[in-house]
């Protein structure tokens, strides 16, 4: 039964939509992982902004195993205590009055967009169906969400695409104003673009979108799949901006590694989604919501949220120093523990090469497009882990420059 597994098996057996790293992690603890050969890695990737409490957090293990001993699944004919507790936690901590659970970020956005269409149709008629989204945005990989996303290369091969979606320029209110009108049912936007290069929204841009949505009776949807659950140093990024959406999608860090997503909204918006209009088999299952409830109660504390701001300082100060030494980056940007280093023009397209060199040094990092090196570590990563990881990053940058020179 037990067969030895190698990275080559991926290329033999898996649909080739990913190009995973050359090593296979087998065990983790905190912000460290070890591969099959026992080599240690410091994890600044955080499973793409998912592992908010690192790996093998004891409280998460307890929450999961306690629930695992009780029951795992019933389907939507029955509700359960962990789901209702998590819903109440989310409602108490945010603008939300109603919650819908699903299993991923794409599903949360899919539900948010369907809600917006139905809300507009029920209240104003079926001609009100336009969705305004933004270039370079990322909202997931279902056909609807990938069409709302602003990277044509991700959607064009799957045409015909759902109609009535248009894309304005991010952080450009005039461009959005040209597209938003009385036939718009929703504007969907990330308060900080993650996959699109770690680009925070300008406060006036989000405020302006709020006003345009109010003028035209359109719902404002914030995609906080990447920015939510403490990532930016506030529980949700909308809290930084003082701009409240009508609908918010959350996933990634919500489960800390266990798949779960949610749509948060008002009672008025939620009321159009009557029995039978939407659903999912696994959404709100007790395993996922028990873990997420534990994750949420740990993160939604002044200690952890202020700690994210503290860690932002640790990262950016050291990254500035590394950049003073090597001059690789134009700009170091982001909020909290979602940080992007934008490569100078002469190194354009080289983010992947730097991440591969980092892996050789024992460091896992992310990229956000070809020109941005991205960090999204655990929100509770220790100072020692940050420092050791940045030592490794500094060596990777040094090797990169030596390679670029030769
Ligand atoms: C990751 C991400 C998604 C998609 O989430 P999945 O869980 O992969 O479906 C959607 N929106 C944003 C902003 C994301 O970062």
Image (spheres, rainbow, N blue to C red):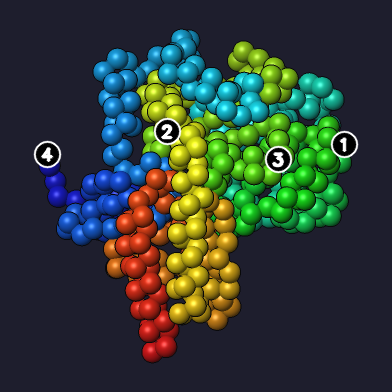
Disc with the residue nearer the chain's start (1 vs 3): 1
Task: Count every numbered label the image shows and give the total.
Answer: 4
Q: Where's the N terminus, which quadrant?
A: top left
Q: Residues within 10 Å of mark 3 (few under 14, many from 20)?
A: few
Q: Residues within 10 Å of mark 1 (few under 14, many from 20)?
A: few
Compared across the picture, whether 33 is left or right of 337 comes to: left
Taking the spot 44% from the left edge, 13% from the top edge, the residue there is 80
Which residue is disc 2 drawn over? 298
Disc with the residue nearer the chain's start (4 vs 1): 4
Which residue is disc 3 drawn over? 242
The CA span between labels 2 and 3 is 24 Å
Q: Where's the C terminus, which quadrant?
A: bottom left
Disc with the residue nearer the chain's start (3 vs 4): 4
Q: Dot 1: what SS?
A: helix
Q: Marks 1 and 3: which is nearer the front?
A: 3
Residue furthest out toward the top: 78
Q: Are marks 1 and 3 in contact (CB under 8 Å)?
A: no
Which residue is disc 4 drawn over? 1
Residue 189 image point, x, y percent: 68, 45
Disc with the residue nearer the chain's start (2 vs 4): 4
């Amino acid at each position: 039964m037990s067969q030895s597994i190698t990275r080559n098996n991926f290329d033999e057996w898996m649909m080739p939509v990913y190009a995973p790293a050359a090593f296979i992690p087998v065990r983790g603890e905190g912000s460290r992982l070890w591969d099959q050969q026992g080599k240690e890695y410091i994890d600044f990737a955080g499973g793409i902004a998912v592992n908010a409490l690192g790996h093998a957090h004891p409280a998460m293990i307890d929450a999961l195993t306690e629930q695992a001993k009780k029951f795992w699944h019933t389907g939507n004919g029955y509700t359960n205590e962990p789901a209702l507790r998590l819903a109440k936690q989310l409602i108490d901590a945010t603008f939300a009055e109603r919650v819908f659970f699903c299993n991923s970020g794409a599903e949360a956005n899919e539900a948010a967009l369907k809600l917006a269409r139905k809300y507009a149709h029920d209240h104003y008629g079926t001609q009100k169906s336009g969705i305004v989204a933004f270039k370079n945005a990322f909202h997931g990989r279902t056909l609807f969400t990938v069409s709302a996303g602003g990277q044509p290369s991700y959607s064009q091969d799957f045409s015909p695409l759902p109609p009535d979606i248009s894309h304005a320029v991010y952080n450009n209110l005039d461009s959005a104003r040209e597209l938003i009108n009385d036939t718009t049912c929703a504007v969907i936007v990330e308060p900080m673009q993650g996959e699109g290069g770690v680009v925070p929204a300008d406060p006036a841009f989000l405020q302006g979108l709020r006003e345009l949505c109010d003028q035209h009776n359109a719902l404002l949807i914030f995609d906080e799949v990447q920015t939510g659950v403490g990532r930016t140093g506030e529980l949700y990024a909308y809290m930084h901006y003082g701009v409240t959406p009508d609908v918010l999608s959350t996933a990634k860090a919500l489960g800390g590694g266990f798949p779960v997503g949610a749509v948060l909204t008002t009672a008025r918006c939620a009321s159009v989604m009557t029995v039978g209009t939407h659903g999912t088999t696994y959404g709100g299952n007790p395993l996922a919501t028990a873990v997420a409830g534990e994750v949420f109660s740990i993160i939604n504390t002044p200690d952890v949220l202020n700690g994210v701001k503290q860690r932002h300082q640790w990262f950016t100060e050291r990254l500035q120093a590394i950049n003073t030494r090597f001059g690789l980056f134009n700009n170091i940007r982001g909020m909290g523990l979602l940080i992007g280093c934008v490569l100078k023009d002469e190194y354009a397209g080289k983010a992947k090469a730097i991440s591969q060199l980092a892996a050789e040094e024992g460091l896992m990092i992310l990229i956000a497009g070809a020109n941005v090196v991205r960090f999204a570590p655990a929100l509770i990563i220790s100072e020692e882990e940050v420092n050791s990881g940045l030592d490794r990053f500094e060596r990777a940058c040094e090797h990169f420059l030596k390679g670029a020179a030769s």
